[in-house]
Every structure is written in C-alpha cells, then in structure tokens.
Image (cartoon, rainbow, N blue to C red):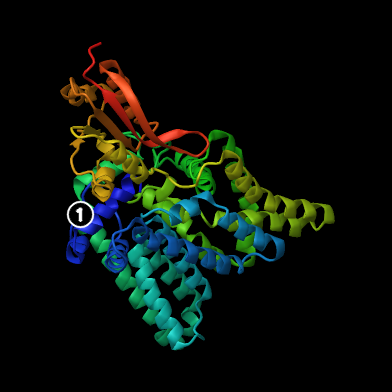
C-alpha cells in the first residue's frame, strides 16, 4: 500500500463503527461515511489484508464498466459505442482507482449509478425496481460526497420530466426520492460535523489550491471573473481528461487530452439536439464538480475530480459520430470511425511502451522481508517519516519490532538533526517509502549518511523499467570517521 492507503487503513482498523461514523479521521484523511463503514465490514469478514482493503474499490471498478456500458448505449451506436467502451476500459486511471484502497473508485461507481438510474427511470417500472434502485441509491449517496450533492439534481430533473404523470409518481418517484435524500443527508451531515474539522479543511484546501504545493494545478478557481473562470474550467477539463486516461500525463500527451475535449464539443451539440433531458443527466456530474469547486466545498482536479469527467469519454466518440452524421460522406465516415479507436489504441500503446504499472507501486513488504534476512543483532533501523505507516503495518509481519521513527521536517537539511544521533553506529539501516518529486528528501538523507560513513548494502524494489526506487533500505557503517 502507498501512504494514503496506509493512513486510511490504519484509521479503519483501529476504530469501531461508531467512531468511524462520528469522529474526524486521523492523519489528515477524509472519506465518506459509506466507504468507511463498508471497508470496516469487509476487513471484519476477510481480515486486515491489503486485498481486503482493496476489495470494495476493485468491485466498484468492475461495476463501473457495466454502468458505463449501459449509459453509453443510450447515446451511441455501432463502432462509436464500442470505441467508448474501449476508451473507458483502457483508462489507466480506472485501473489505478480499482487497485487503490481509497474511496475514489466507489465515488466513480456511485455517480455512474445515479446517472444510469436517472436515464432509466420511468413511471411504468415495477415496485421491485423502484425500491431496489432506491436502496442502491442510498448506498451510492453514502459512498461519495459528490454523489450526495448530485441526488437533488437528478431528482429535480426526473420530477420536471414526469410531473405531468403525477398520478403515477406517488408509487414510483417518492420511494426513490425519500431513500436517496435520506442517504445524501446522512453523508452530508457526517461531512459537516465529522469530516469538516477546521484544521483538516484548511490543510486540504491549501493543498489543492497550491498554497502548500504538491499538485500541478488549481483545485479551486483563482477568480470568479467570468473570463478567468471559463479559462479555469477549460484548463481543468482538459487536465482531468488526461488524468482519467493517463493517470498523471506528461506534457506531450496534453495534445491528446485537448483533442478529446475539442472533439467532444460537437458531441454536446449533437446530444442536446437529440436528447436534451438525457444529456442534462449525463452532464450533471461534470456540472456538480464545477459547482463544488466554485463554492470551495470540494476540489475539482486530479484524483478527486475524476468522478466528474467520464461523460467526455462518451461525448468524444459522439462528436465524431455527429460529424459522420452531418457530412454523410463515406470517406469522412471511415476517418471518424478510425479516429474513434485511435485514442484508446494510443493509450494502450503508451502503457506497453512505457512499461510502468498503472498503480502507485510502493512494495514495502518485500523490501522489509529482505531487510529482516540481512539484519544482525544490534542493527539500528532509521525509518523515514513517510515510511512509518508502512513499517507499522508490515514490520511486525516480517519480524521487525524495534526501529527508530524519523521526525517530520519541512526542509531536507533539517533531517540532519535526527541523523547526527546515529554517528558512531556500526550498522545503521535507512528505510524509506513515499519518495516524490515534490519531496525527494530520501535522496538528501542518503547523501548525508554517505558523508557520515560508508554504504554497505542496498535492498531495493524498482518500479517498472525506469528503475525509480519507491521503497528501499540502505545499510551504512557510521563508525567510520571521515
């Protein structure tokens, strides 16, 4: 597990159901109440393994594929329908979300379900359908804060579409409305009183607004000036498309994200003309994402905004289909169909060529197993501050019980204070995870340890073909005087 997964897992494992439902999480973690309680149930059944923590996200990602397919069928046909499905399934982000013990995968599935339910609602369904959709809607509104906010929007659209059929709405609309609003209210109340701790709220706000760094964009609009707001929406839309398709795309792939966005614009026009109501429901997650960021309730960027951008994976092939329908030329039709498959083909090709697994891969446990084998009596293990959760979780499993936790410092040079205490030690291990470009502090720590003594051994687990070490242990002899 990576750092955020470990922090979330520790909260869930060390608290009971009541504490999870009523108290703010430790370690600056934020998650909807439905995710926390469901995760607690799964680890109670399957044990506190990494796979048990990742079962809900994995299940949600599988359900997302089927929901996306059912939604796409209402807008696309033929080649364009299958290209949208391939585009969604080849998304590196979807694979990451489904393999990460965080709430983002459930958030995506919850939003997809609400859209699917809104598109398929009819006063002519059976009572079993209404109550089933109502109960599932409760779960979805508890699994996601944005989904909880979406609920009134979906219900309002359904009411205005079917208000002329008031004689049938009592038995069809009201059960769903009551259950959905109940779930949404519970989640939002939890968010207000248990999650929105002022310190955590300020920290998260600053993080996503770039005041404390750590991201490459603005999670909230820098200004409400109409032109600046529009520029921010376009910029973040293109960025989110890239983040959904490629996880964290390098700059050369920006052109693919921008092309996808531009091709989606005729798709919006085409969809509105053909199915205004259905298009309104489809675009609701996107509009809710923007609204939540404008009012600074929820950032709209990167992993926290991916729930809102998937409609563009339908609008992109729909834009190509619109051009095909408008021009009605065989040559144009063939070109549009080829282009509809070009983007998912490029994604798959890029992933294969780069050879990087589409997950945040921080294999602490294999490194610690090898570290345990190489240890000798009297060894000292100094653990980088961001590797503490990994050591706490996996250390006891491999037989490592005694280690020195590193303190947190905002500057790399400040770690010398901890390291100076190790002078004169014959065998000192330095273990770390969570190396990032924003805080490559482990590199500075290794350089300083090398200046104090001599490196004796390295235990590492490189990531992909690039060889970037995201979890490693270094043995130093600090008894040598330099």
* Residue at point 52%, 56% (across, down): 310
Which quadrant would residue 426 be assigned to in this image?
top left
Total marks in image: 1
- Nearer to me, 392 or 385: 392
**In the image, residue 125 lies at what x, y percent?**
50, 85
Where's residue 23, x and y in %? 18, 58
**Residue with the mark numbered 1:** 24
Circle 1 crowding by C-alpha within 10 Å: few under 14, some 14–19, many from 20: many
Q: Is residue 402 visible from the viewing direction of this image?
A: yes
Residue at image coords 71%, 65%: 78
Q: Quadrant of the C terminus?
A: top left
Q: Secondary structure at mark 1?
A: loop
User: Which of 112 and 61 lies nearest the eye of the viewer?
Assistant: 61
User: Residue lying farthest right?
Assistant: 330
The percent coordinates of residue 399 (x first, y second) are 24, 46
| In-front residue for pair 158/195 | 195
| Residue lying at the far top of the rendered structure | 482
């Amino acid at each position: 597990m990576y750092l955020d997964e470990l922090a979330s897992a520790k909260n869930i494992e060390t608290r009971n159901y009541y504490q999870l439902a009523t108290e703010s999480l430790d370690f600056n973690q934020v998650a909807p109440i439905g995710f926390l309680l469901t995760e607690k149930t799964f680890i109670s059944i399957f044990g506190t393994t990494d796979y048990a923590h990742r079962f809900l996200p994995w299940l949600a990602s599988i359900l997302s594929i089927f929901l996306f397919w059912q939604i796409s069928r209402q807008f696309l046909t033929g080649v364009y329908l299958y290209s949208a499905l391939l585009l969604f399934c080849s998304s590196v982000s979807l694979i990451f979300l489904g393999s990460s013990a965080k709430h983002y995968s459930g958030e995506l599935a919850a939003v997809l379900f609400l859209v699917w339910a809104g598109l398929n609602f009819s006063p002519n369904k059976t009572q079993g359908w209404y109550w089933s959709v109502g109960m599932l809607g409760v779960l979805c509104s508890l699994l996601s804060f944005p989904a909880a906010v979406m609920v009134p929007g979906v219900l309002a659209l359904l009411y205005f579409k079917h208000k002329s059929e008031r004689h049938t709405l009592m038995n069809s609309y009201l059960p769903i409305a009551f259950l959905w609003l109940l779930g949404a209210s519970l989640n939002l109340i939890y968010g207000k009183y248990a999650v929105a701790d002022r310190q955590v709220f300020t920290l998260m706000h600053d993080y996503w607004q770039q005041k404390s760094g750590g991201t490459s964009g603005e999670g909230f609009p820098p200004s409400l000036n109409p032109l600046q707001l529009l520029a921010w929406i376009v910029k973040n839309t293109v960025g989110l498309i890239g983040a959904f398709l490629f996880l964290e795309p390098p700059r050369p792939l920006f052109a693919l994200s921008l092309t996808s966005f531009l091709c989606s614009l005729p798709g919006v026009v085409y969809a509105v003309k053909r199915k205004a109501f259905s298009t309104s429901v489809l675009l609701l997650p996107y509009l809710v994402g923007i609204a939540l960021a404008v009012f600074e309730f929820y950032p709209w960027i990167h992993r926290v905004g991916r729930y809102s951008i998937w409609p563009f994976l339908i609008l992109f092939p729909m834009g190509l289909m619109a051009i095909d329908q408008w021009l009605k030329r065989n040559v144009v039709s063939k070109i549009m169909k080829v282009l509809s498959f070009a983007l998912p083909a490029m994604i798959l090709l890029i992933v294969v060529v780069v050879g990087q697994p589409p997950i945040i891969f921080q294999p602490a446990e294999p490194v610690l197993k090898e570290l345990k084998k190489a240890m000798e009596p009297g060894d000292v293990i100094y653990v980088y501050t961001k590797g503490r959760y990994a050591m706490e979780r996996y250390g006891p499993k491999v037989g490592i019980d005694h280690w020195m936790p590193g303190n947190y410092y905002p500057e790399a040079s400040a770690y010398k204070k901890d390291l100076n205490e190790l002078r004169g030690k014959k065998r000192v291990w330095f273990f770390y995870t969570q190396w990032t470009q924003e805080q490559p502090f482990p590199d500075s720590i290794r350089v300083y340890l090398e200046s104090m003594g001599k490196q004796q051994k390295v235990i590492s687990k490189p990531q992909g073909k690039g060889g970037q070490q995201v979890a490693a242990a270094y043995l130093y002899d600090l008894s040598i005087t330099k």
